[in-house]
Amino acid sequence: MTDVVEIKEDDLVLARHIPASAAWSEGLNFFSQDSEFIQVGVWGYGEGKELKAHIHNEVKREVLWTQEVLFVRQGRIRANVFDTQEQKVAELEVSAGDIIILLRGGHGYDILEDGTQVLEIKNGPYVGPDLDRRRL
């Protein structure tokens, strides 16, 4: 994870930016810790590789925070990262092919290019905007 940038508040990881150059390599690579509520990994294999079928077991989990993953498919964004005290602590430029993991604190975005397309994934279940978040 040499090119991966972590934004921290003391020991707490607020965000993790994985540039395309670090994200997309051969094999299976995870960019999250086992203890994080959202697990983020990428994989890339050549033709003929078989990934064995599996079923996930039912496991009770306690989820305390909504965490998000953004994949910028096309264009560029600026991710504004806030700490748990609602203070802006970083700006990350996220480009096509990049991934950003937002674990704690707050965040907002500025779109930097026309036609920008972003895939957002977050843990659920979704409890609605009034319970899930507050605007900074």
Image: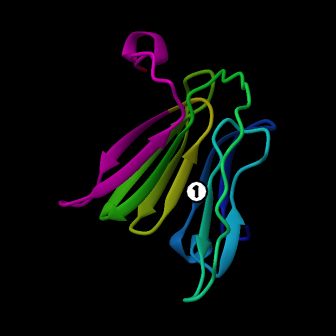
Where residue 50 appears, x then y in whole percent? 64, 78
Magenta stretch?
107-135
Question: Between 124 and 73, which is closer to the camera in this rendering?
Answer: 124
**Label 1 SS:** strand
Hey, which residue is sitting farthest left in the picture? 114
Residue 117 magenta-highlighted: yes
Image coords of residue 114 (percent x, y): 18, 60
Magenta includes 115? yes
Q: Locate residue 91 relative to residue 9 in the image: left or right.
A: left
Q: Nearer the viewer, residue 92 or 19?
A: 19
At 73% from the left and 67% from the top, the residue drawn is 1
Whether 61 is drawn above or below 118: the answer is: above
Circle 1 residue: 17
Q: Residue at x 71, y 21 (%)?
A: 62
The image quadrant that residue 43 belongs to is: bottom right
**Image coords of residue 89 (percent x, y):** 58, 39
Q: Quadrant of residue 56?
A: top right
In this view, 40 is above or below 132: below
Quarter in which the C terminus is drawn: top left
